[in-house]
Image (spheres, rainbow, N blue to C red):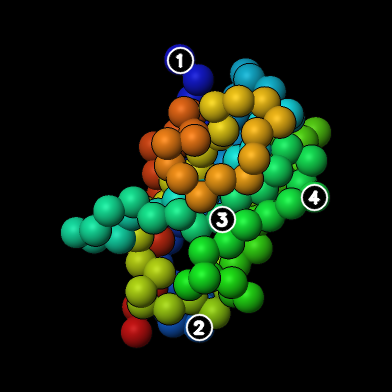
Amino acid sequence: QVQLVESGGGLVQAGGSLRLSCAAPGRSFRTYAKGWFRQPPGKERQFVAAISWSGSTTNYADSVKGRFTISRDNAKNTVDLEMNSLKPEDTAVYYCAVDQNPYGMVSSESGSYNYWGQGTQVTVSS
């Protein structure tokens, strides 16, 4: 069973920043696109950002464009999400995910991903 491990969540005031990181111990996903999703309280899981296997292509939800940056380090087998200018509506459990196919498209659809982390809570206070 492949396990993705997120870290970096926490409580921050509106306007603040957090950096989430996701690692995949024991498995290399160097050739797979990776993504971040979130699930706000009482709502369905939402796409946040995705990055291609090479890092050359990224995709963001409109709600986070200009504030969030996704990046990856294939040598370390990690994917990060830098979150700036945080708003209370960014409060959610954040999940990292790995695409089901190597060299896949940068997808915003959760069905394109078949490896998921356990989630990390991000809470933004007003």
Which residue is most to the front?
A: 105
Mark identifier at residue 49? 3
Question: The C terminus appears in which quarter of the rendering?
Answer: bottom left
Q: How far apart are marks 3 and 4 (CA)?
A: 13 Å
Relative image position of residue 75 (x, y in whole percent): 80, 33
Q: How far apart are marks 2 and 1 (CA)?
A: 38 Å
Q: Earlier in the sequence, mark 3 or mark 2?
A: 2
SS at mark 3 in the image: strand
Residue at position x 19%, y 59% from top? 42
- Residue type at mark 4: give it: Ser
- Residue type at mark 3: give it: Ala
Relative image position of residue 41 (x, y in whole percent): 24, 60
Residue at position x 40%, y 61% from top? 122
SS at mark 1 in the image: loop
Assess disc 4: are there few (<14), some (14-19) or many (≥20) residues with their C-alpha within 10 Å of its C-alpha: few
Return the residue at label 2. Answer: 15
Q: Which of marks 4 and 1 is nearer the N terminus?
A: 1
Q: How far apart are marks 4 and 2 (CA)?
A: 28 Å
Assess disc 3: are there few (<14), some (14-19) or many (≥20) residues with their C-alpha within 10 Å of its C-alpha: many
Question: The N terminus appears in which quarter of the rendering?
Answer: top left
SS at mark 2 in the image: loop
Among the 4 quarters of the image, the one containing residue 118 = top left
- Residue type at mark 1: give it: Gln
Q: Distance between the residues labelled 3 and 2?
A: 20 Å
Return the residue at label 4. Answer: 56
Which of the two discs, 4 and 1, sits closer to the camera? 4
Assess disc 1: are there few (<14), some (14-19) or many (≥20) residues with their C-alpha within 10 Å of its C-alpha: few
Q: Earlier in the sequence, mark 4 or mark 2?
A: 2
Assess disc 2: are there few (<14), some (14-19) or many (≥20) residues with their C-alpha within 10 Å of its C-alpha: some
Q: Which of 123 and 115 is in front in this view?
A: 115
Mark identifier at residue 1? 1
